[in-house]
Image (cartoon, rainbow, N blue to C red):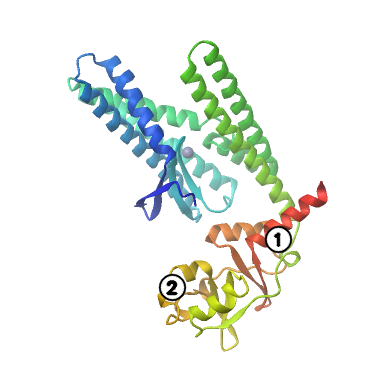
Amino acid sequence: MNKNTIVLGRIFGIPLNVDSSWFLIFALLSWMLAINYYPGEFQDWPQWQYWLMGMVTSFFLFVSVILHELGHSLVARRFRLPVRRITLFVFGGIAQIAGEPPSARAEFWIALAGPIVSFFLAAAFYFVTPLAEGMEALFAFFKYLAFINLVLAGFNLIPGFPLDGGRIFRSLLWGITGDLRKATIVAANVGRFFAFAFIFLGALQIIAGRIMDGLWTIFIGLFLESAASSQIHQQEVRTLLIRHKVQEAMNPNFAIVPADSSLQEIVDRHVLGMGRRAVIVVDDGDIAGMLTLHHLKSVSPEKWPIVQVAQVMLPFSRMRWVTPDTDMWSTLQAMDKDGVNQLPVLHEGKLVGIITRGDLISFLNYLHSLST
Ligand SMILES: [Zn+2]
């Protein structure tokens, strides 16, 4: 994970993070509200009140974005897709949902949930606005939040992948054609079309003298372009990996350690000695689990000599594994779902190898070098 990320806490058990780029937007938005929006609505406030309202309003925009992402996340969970985290960054928020949606229907509802939340918030703020008649700060605050949530819903419904609207569009294409790959390529290309439209519009704004607005629009366009292109790239990777099986890239040389070894022994013999990132743990000849660097790091080094492998390993019952016949794309998806970098390979209940993310990436590079 990015080290510019600050962990705020958890909401419904989902980690909530803020990327440092978000603070720039918080400051910029507070500033625009304080010098532009609020003074335009009310001329006779003291200076501090403009700034206070600017910051309070920005904060509630931040809450609105979290609720939008939470909409996606909770629906994703209903479809049994794990949600890694919600991250707020310069363009709003992103709910990192692990794995691909299982069906077109799932993708449709997951994508629609965010804009529905934003529409609902816009309506709620719109209908409470008249209640604040006479309390001008509150009145202007409700009015702005109604507006900005409507903008959030509207912007996200642009039908270019990977925006929400593009995901909805993709799910419809996917549902109709049954071809996820084609649906993704078409929806991502529509995304690129909108990206270029934004860049063009930004250029027009700059020509018209609205330089800040223009730069911002171009910035959004560039961001959309790179997001859409990376989705196209990911589809290409999928096409390559789905044709190949684990047995072509797995490593048949894996380390087996007894369950009662100490962590120190593993570090000395396998991590430092052999550069291994994972070992398979056996107990009485059966696989008991897997120990990775991640598990080692969860224990402080001075305890390594006294902690046994079995106490911190991932037990077999919770371990995901693949077979030599599993395709490489599903393998990568399985790693993403669990947030792990390696999976054991089992054939008829017997351990035959281990496959790592690194193995898959090297294999992909090898395929690339063959095709160019
Ligand atoms: Zn969304």
Task: Give the residue drawn at x 53%, y 15%.
Answer: 206
Query: Which amino acid lies under the numbered mark 2 shown in the image of this protein?
Result: Pro
Which type of secondary structure does the marked residue at label 2 adopt?
Answer: helix
Q: Decide if residue 251 is on the left or right side of residue 117.
A: right
The residue carrying mark 2 has its beta carbon less than 8 Å from ligand 1: no
In the rendered image, residue 62, in percent from the top left (x then y), is placed at 36, 37
Measure how far apart labels 2 and 1 are at the Cα level.
Answer: 38 Å
Specify whether tag 1 is near ligand 1 (CB below 8 Å). Answer: no
Q: What element carries label 1?
A: loop
Q: Residues within 10 Å of mark 1 (few under 14, many from 20)?
A: some
> Is residue 19 in view?
yes
Camera-nearest residue between 292 and 128:
292
Q: Mark 1 points at which residue?
A: 327
Residue that appears at 56% across and 57% down: 336
Q: In this view, does 321 lie to the left or right of 77?
A: right
Q: Is residue 284 toward the left or the right of residue 346 in the image?
A: left
Q: Estimate how packed mark 2 is, as few (under 14), some (14 to 19) or many (20 or more) residues with alpha carbons within 10 Å.
A: few
When the figure is inspected, residue 304 is found, relative to residue 369, above or below; the finding is below
User: Percent position (x, y) of residue 118?
Assistant: 40, 34
The residue shown at (22%, 26%) is: 138
- Judging by the rendered image, the residue that carries numbered circle 2 is 301
Q: Which amino acid does label 1 sit on?
A: Asp
Instruction: Evaluate if marks 2 and 1 touch, with contact meaning CB atoms under 8 Å apart.
Output: no
Q: Which of marks 2 and 1 is nearer the N terminus?
A: 2
